Amino acid sequence: MFGRTKTKAWRNLESLQHKYNINMRELFAKDDKRAERYTIQLENMLVDYSKNLINDQILDGLLALAKERGLADKIKEMYSGAKINQTENRAVLHIALRNKENKPIYVDGHDVMPKIATTLEKIKDFSEAVRLGTFTGYTGKKLTNIVNIGIGGSDLGPFMATQALKPYWAKDINCYFISNIDGTSCAEVLNHIDPETTLFIVASKTFTTIETLTNAHTCRKWLVDALGEHAVAKHFVALSTNKAEVEKFGINPDNMFEFWDFVGGRYSMWSAIGLIIAIAVGYKNFERMLEGAYAMDKHFYEADFAHNIPVILALIGIWYINFHDVHRYAVVPYDQYLQYLPSYLQQLDMESNGKSISLDNKYVDYSTAPVVFGGAGTNVQHSFFQLLHQGTDIVPVDFIIPAISHNEIGAHQEILIANVLAQAEALMNGKTEEEAVAEMEKCGNSKAEIARMKKNKSFTGNRPSNMIIVRKLDPYSLGMLVAMYEHRTFVQGVIWNINSFDQFGVELGKKLALNILPELQGTAVQVEHDSSTASLIRYIKGIRK
Ligand code: G6Q
């Protein structure tokens, strides 16, 4: 069994944490090769992890932990189709969805690649037909409003990716996303589109999720009211693993794009769940995204761990969470098109690794996933960055920026780049009281004013960040970026000895509301509740009478 106190590498890291009081500013001053040594480049992506509380001994210690945890074998297991999602007895094969070399991968003795190829072919044909207008709506009009109805993993990935790739959208196509059960989510889309030109994509792995099915039924009624029952076949398609439920809903299985149990919801944007991406940006670009992910998959599989981007990023995360007691992690893309990446990563990281039961079926005695948050820079510099610079807690940050923008207008991109670099530098360098005093003296502040303000104007610094630069945010680099985070998440799960691929906490949520719903609707006698829940139900029912 794996427990914090039981492993050599873990104990070694604890002693390294006590031994080295890392001061990044000093280390940079002493070692002009630090940035060079702590940077990894893969094709057009560069990851500079030098502004972290690490030195060579600590990195070696972290790599020894990865070795001790059998990471190399675990990666091989995942790539070979082993059922590493042991609570659900499933293989974990999002890598197969972008396996561009098409090497066979077997699950239960069957190669999964042919069926993946068949679905990809179907996505290609259908997305092209919609874009060309050869597949039209019931009245013969081109389908230009594409509405994805899905939630969680069937929403966040395609939503984030379509927004990230907006410059590649066909000029006449608009994408919409309905996810929340809140009627507003449906209403706000339906109020702005025309049934004759609308394609609904019902995206649900299980096809039993109440939010998605309720929203899909509402949209179906809206369409049938406008165009009649016969129109459904031309305006609804399904993305699912559950043929029987798709048929029950009234969608012809010919209009179903299949995926499989070995694709987890939050890892599914590369599968049929990515249909809206393919329609928006065209199949060629969708394929480029898969190719980018494949490049990262290959790197993750082949690169030695000391030069392996997802492994190094994961281990640095472990260093803060488990050896510095830091349970927060910010992701800040400096690109407006990536503004939804933090919410996507929130699910990827927190749903995958927000666990406390080990693979040995024991409660872990160490921390797992941190709270993940973020937003687009520079906007968030004007909100939560105050806490990053001067709050009492350390928050490690991933900065992400493309060197070239899709919108090179005047000096915008240079100002953006200057900001991201300045933020990382400032977090690392800080500002001593002496420096703050010198600055204020230069500005002619009085002695009294300086005494009053010098602490407020100084910064402890020594705050860690990674800088991730891509040449340009295109489908390929987006694929690389997302696959990088998927593998980072997996590595941390391996270190923590947990199953990153189940989600019983989410499933609990799917059931809980069903107990209260009949009471609200007045179709069930009151169930036993705690006094708070019972009185809240009475209060709300009173208002809604
Ligand atoms: C993802 C989770 C969860 C799931 C949604 C939607 O990994 O399992 O977010 O994607 O609950 O589920 P369906 O796709 O089955 O509707």
Image (cartoon, rainbow, N blue to C red):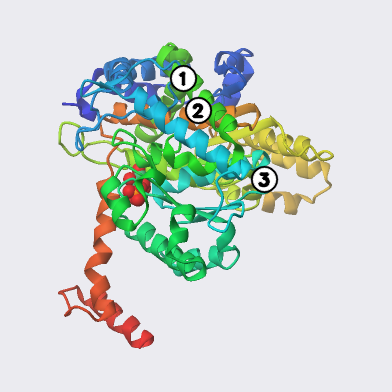
The residue wearing badge 3 is 378
- Element type where label 2 sits in the image: helix
Tell which of 12 and 136 is nearer to you: 136
Q: Residue at x 53, y 48 (%)?
A: 391
Residue 58 lies, in percent from the top left, at 42, 19
Q: Tell me the amino acid under the disc marked 2.
A: Leu
Q: Residues within 10 Å of mark 2 (few under 14, many from 20)?
A: many
Choose mark 3 or mark 2, whichever is in front: 2
**Percent x, y of residue 229:** 42, 64
Cβ of mark 3 under 8 A from ligand 1 = no
Where is residue 231 drawn, in percent x and y?
47, 59
Residue depth check, mark 1 versus mark 3: number of the one nearer the observer: 1
Could you say which disc has been placed on residue 290 in the image?
A: 2
The quadrant of the rendering that contains the C terminus is bottom left
Tell me: residue 70, above or below residue 195.
above
Q: CA distance from mark 1 to mark 2?
A: 8 Å
Q: Amino acid at mark 3?
A: Thr
Please name the residue shown 46% across and 30% down the image.
121
